[in-house]
């Protein structure tokens, strides 16, 4: 049974990883921009810097939302277990907070995740900080391969002029069985990059 659960989780994680590697970047290569997805538009207009429930408090930590081109965009996410028990075990990959960014049109970094299933013990009241990190990929035939190669090779987050949704989400489950116990924590805000 345990092998079936692990295999199921690996298959799920592989699908997530493959999806994370796919993104379009037509605006970067000069193609016509796409219409912004209504869900992205809503998130851009209603930032959510804090999510809190009976188990966790998640925060997006950013000091400003307007940046100049070539200015590093620095932010992080924090997660605190605030439940009733002294500790709580979550299940998922080692990197259990993922980062996402998009302009809502063509530029998109979905983030990628590893596929292992491991347990992590969180201590009540202990805040864990997760600095933004890049993850994802691109294909050699991507019309914007040069942009993405430079993007992923730079340590800092640097973006061309535009308006972007930046987000962090939880990538873990509340039980070892994983199925139907994924925790849906997410925080996000809109940033603007100007000349």
Image: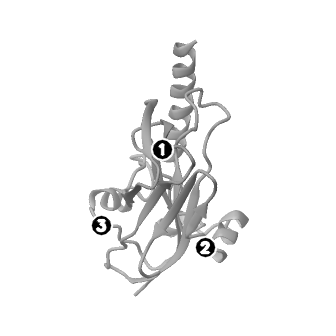
Report the residue marked by disc 3: 156
Q: Which mark is residue 155?
A: none
Q: Which residue carries the number 2 mark?
A: 47
First of labels 3, 2 by sequence position: 2
**Quadrant of the rendered structure where residue 40 is?**
bottom right
Which mark lies nearer to you, 3 or 2?
2
Of label 2 and label 1, which has the lower sequence position? 2
Specify the quadrant of the image occupied by residue 115. top left
Residue at screen point 57% across, 20% down: 5
Residue 163 shows in the view: no
Distance (Cα) linking label 2 and label 1: 31 Å
Count of marks placed on residues:
3
Element type at mark 2: loop
The secondary structure type at the circle numbered 1 is loop
Q: Position of residue 13 (x, y in %)?
A: 52, 34
Q: Position of residue 30 (x, y in %)?
A: 50, 70
Query: Label 1: how many residues lie within 10 Å, few (<14), some (14-19) or many (20+)?
Result: few
Residue 186 x %, y %:
58, 58
User: Which residue matches tag 1?
Assistant: 86
Nearest the eye: 171 or 114:
171
Foreground mark, 2 or 1? 1
Q: CA distance from mark 3 to mark 2?
A: 23 Å
Other residues around mark 2 within 10 Å, as few (<14) / some (14–19) / many (≥20): some
């Amino acid at each position: 049974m345990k092998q079936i659960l692990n295999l199921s989780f690996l298959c799920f994680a592989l699908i997530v990883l493959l999806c994370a590697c796919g993104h379009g970047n037509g605006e970067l290569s000069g193609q016509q921009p796409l219409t912004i997805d209504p869900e992205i538009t809503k998130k851009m207009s209603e930032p959510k810097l804090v999510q809190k429930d009976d188990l966790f408090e998640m925060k997006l930590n950013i000091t400003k939302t307007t940046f100049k081109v070539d200015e590093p965009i620095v932010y992080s996410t924090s997660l605190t277990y605030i439940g009733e028990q002294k500790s709580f075990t979550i299940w998922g990959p080692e990197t259990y907070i993922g980062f996402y960014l998009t302009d809502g049109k063509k530029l998109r970094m979905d983030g990628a995740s590893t596929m292992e299933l491991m347990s992590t013990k969180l201590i009540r009241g202990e805040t864990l900080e997760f600095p933004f990190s890049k993850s994802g990929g691109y294909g050699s035939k991507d019309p914007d391969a040069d942009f993405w190669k430079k993007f992923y090779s730079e340590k800092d987050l640097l973006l061309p002029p535009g308006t972007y949704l930046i987000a962090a989400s939880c990538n873990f489950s509340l039980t070892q069985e994983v199925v139907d116990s994924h925790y849906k924590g997410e925080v996000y805000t809109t940033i603007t990059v100007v000349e």
